Image (cartoon, helix red, strand yellow):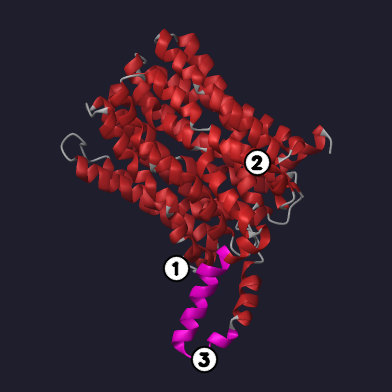
Amino acid sequence: MTFRDTLKTYLDRRIFWVFLMGCASGFPWVLIGSAMSGWLKDAGLTRTAIGLFGSVFAVYAINFLWAPFLDRVKLPLLKSIGQRRSWILLMQSLMLGLTCLIATIDPTVSLLMTSLVALGIAIASATQDIAIDAYRIDHFSSSPKNQIPAASAMAVIGWWTGYSLPGYVAFSYADSLGWSQVYWILAGFCAVLMLFTLLIGEPESERDSLHAELESKYSQLAATSTRRALRWLTITIWEPLADFLRRNGVQTALAILLFIFLFKIGEAFLGRMSIVFYKEIGFSNAQIADYTKMLGWFAIIGFTLLGSIINVRLGLVKGLLIGGSAMALSNLMFAWIAIAGPKEWLFAATIIVDNFTTAFSSVAFVSFLTALTGKAFSATQYALLASIGNLGRTTLASASGWFVDVTGSWVLFFVLTTVLVLPGLALLFMIRHRISTLKTED
């Protein structure tokens, strides 16, 4: 395939729809991530408290528990817009209401209420992610191999757009308007994303026919209402896991799951404390907006497109090995800032390098997970894989603030984020030959 042919894959309108849904997926991480960290830091909370507040992200690690219902349940009042979009729109409606509510709360007065509302946003966002990932996979489940990295790239670009541009607005106006008013602005972004959901197309899918085949397979359980319920639960909950194990083999499947758990832990530790670090080292809200949001957004777009093209030619396993290694080493740039102080040129260089390695590794990682997903249970299987990746990121990363408080050293912290990437890369290297025979390298 030529370079020109690779670029043509981005002209498919479904790629643009994936981009819009990526924006919707990234946006909630502003609400309960970067903007909330900035608000809590300005309110005087400790690093340990801010790190523990991030425990609300743990719901992303367990959303596979209710993912099967998004594969099987059609929402009656919204079914006219399609199964995937109806779930997305419902979750966005909940997030809009909760964003308006959080704008009325002062975390210094009621931290518990702030935490509960943030948890509600996290649950709605994690559920939305199940439907969005399934939406992307359903659109490209039967497409040529080169379209998977392209779709994954646009999902990554969309995620960072939904995260960076609203984040830029939030930090740009935080000092002049105050964080409460900023959240009213973010509620407006949420309403725009709901409009996008209504404008995109619902994917065609073989899901209903595949489910019908499984209904016939378990037809012996249909005699009584109890057995019918058991059949529904068997198909909904057991079959997605059994299908994944059958296609990959038990031993390789378990090794893949362990790699997914380990791969993003270092990045999660860094991400949880990054805003706190920038503020403590001496950067203003405006500088954070300019460099991490706006400059970072331009960098992520260019590097993600480049990463998708390179990953098509390298293959997913090599892409993961190279991207993961570069991601680990780039974390040391932050240690350099910790030593040198708030130098803007170094801040800009670090953001560019970090976004390059993040973009490259993310395209490979999302493509890898997508290629492992079957057609009948795209929501359930992708959610299971992504949840395992989020488990290390959202649970262990809650201790990131505690580590900095105990050691008193940002340099040691960033060295730790580098070291944490290595076990996953070592495991991937050991199982690379088994993975290369799977669907990921077809």
Task: Please give the residue where the numbered disc 1 appears in the rendered image.
Answer: 77
User: Counting other residues with Cα less than 10 Å from the Cα at mark 2, is it few (<14), some (14-19), or many (20 or more)?
Assistant: few
The image position of residue 304, as x and y in percent, is 63, 32
Gap in angstroms between the C-alphas marked 3 and 2: 48 Å
User: Counting other residues with Cα less than 10 Å from the Cα at mark 1, is it few (<14), some (14-19), or many (20 or more)?
Assistant: few
Q: Mark 1 or 2, which is nearer the eye? A: 2
User: Counting other residues with Cα less than 10 Å from the Cα at mark 3, is it few (<14), some (14-19), or many (20 or more)?
Assistant: few
The image position of residue 30, as x and y in percent, is 40, 36
Task: Please give the residue where the numbered disc 3 appears in the rendered image.
Answer: 223
View extreme (bottom): residue: 223
Task: Please give the residue where the numbered disc 2 appears in the rendered image.
Answer: 430
The magenta segment is 219-241
Asked whether the residues under the numbered discs 3 and 2 touch, taking CB atoms below 8 Å apart as contact, a structural biologist would say: no
Pick whichever of labels 3 and 2 is earlier in the sequence.
Answer: 3
Question: Is 2 placed left or right of 237 in the picture?
Answer: right
- Is residue 32 within the magenta segment? no
- Element assignment for label 2: helix
Q: Nearer the viewer, residue 436 or 307?
A: 436
Q: Which kind of residue does numbered mark 2 sit on?
A: Met
Question: Is 404 placed left or right of 205 in the picture?
Answer: left
Residue 111 showing in the rendered view: yes
Q: Which kind of residue does numbered mark 3 sit on?
A: Ala
Q: Residue 341's quadrant in the figure? A: top left
The image position of residue 150, as x and y in percent, is 68, 41
Q: Residue 379's quadrant in the figure? A: bottom right
Q: Nearer the viewer, residue 227 or 92?
A: 227
